[in-house]
Amino acid sequence: MTEEEHTESRIAMISIILENTVESEALNDILHEYRDYIIGRMGIPYREKGLYLISVAVDAPQNVTSALTGRLGRLKDVSVKTAYSKK
């Protein structure tokens, strides 16, 4: 078993704000790499402000969620915050 399989899975909500579409392909590519952990996602375009609001629900070990959010957060004009369930 890998270290990842030994780590307890946690539910988390990842909130993403994308401030332009330049990084949208890179963002979607990263999310695609983590598709096995993603429960669901919802995207809301806020055209009046030129923002794209994305919520992603994941069920993954905390280190996997941290790796995902770290990669997303390094993208230009992308802000990311994560909330974990208590269970």
Image (spheres, rainbow, N blue to C red):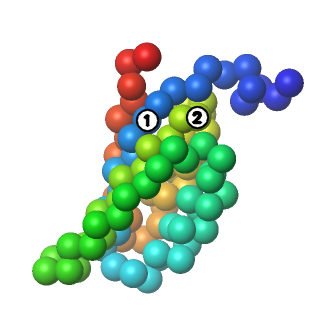
Name the residue nearer the viewer: 30 or 40: 40
The residue wearing badge 2 is 60
Q: In this view, does 84 lie above or below 50?
A: above
* Relative horizontal placement of residue 47, taking residue 40 as reference (left or right): left
Q: Residues within 10 Å of mark 1 (few under 14, many from 20)?
A: many
Q: Residue at x 13, y 80 (%)?
A: 48
Q: Is mark 1 on a helix, strand or loop?
A: strand
Total count of labels: 2
Name the residue at the top extreme: 87
As shown in the figure, which amino acid type bears the numbered disc 1?
A: Ala
* Image location of residue 68, percent across then percent down: 55, 49
In what quadrant of the picture does the C terminus appear? top left
Q: Is mark 2 on a helix, strand or loop?
A: strand
How far apart marks 2 and 1 lie (CA) works out to 8 Å
Q: Do the residues labelled 2 and 1 touch (CB within 8 Å)?
A: yes
Q: Which residue is drawn at 51% across and 44% down?
A: 39
* Image location of residue 85, percent across then percent down: 39, 25
Q: Which mark is residue 79?
A: none
Q: Quadrant of residue 54?
A: bottom left
In what quadrant of the picture does the N terminus appear? top right
Name the residue nearer the viewer: 84 or 40: 40
Q: Residue at x 46, y 75 (%)?
A: 24
The residue wearing badge 1 is 12
* Relative horizontal placement of residue 32, taking residue 52 as reference (left or right): right
Q: Quadrant of residue 7?
A: top right
Q: In which quarter of the image is residue 33?
A: bottom right
Q: In this view, does 11 lie above or below 80?
A: above
Marked residue nearer the N-terminal end (2 or 1): 1
Q: In this view, does 19 lie above or below 56?
A: below
* Relative horizontal placement of residue 53, taking residue 74 as reference (left or right): left
Q: Which residue is drawn at 28% across and 66% down?
A: 44
* Image location of residue 23, percent across then percent down: 47, 76
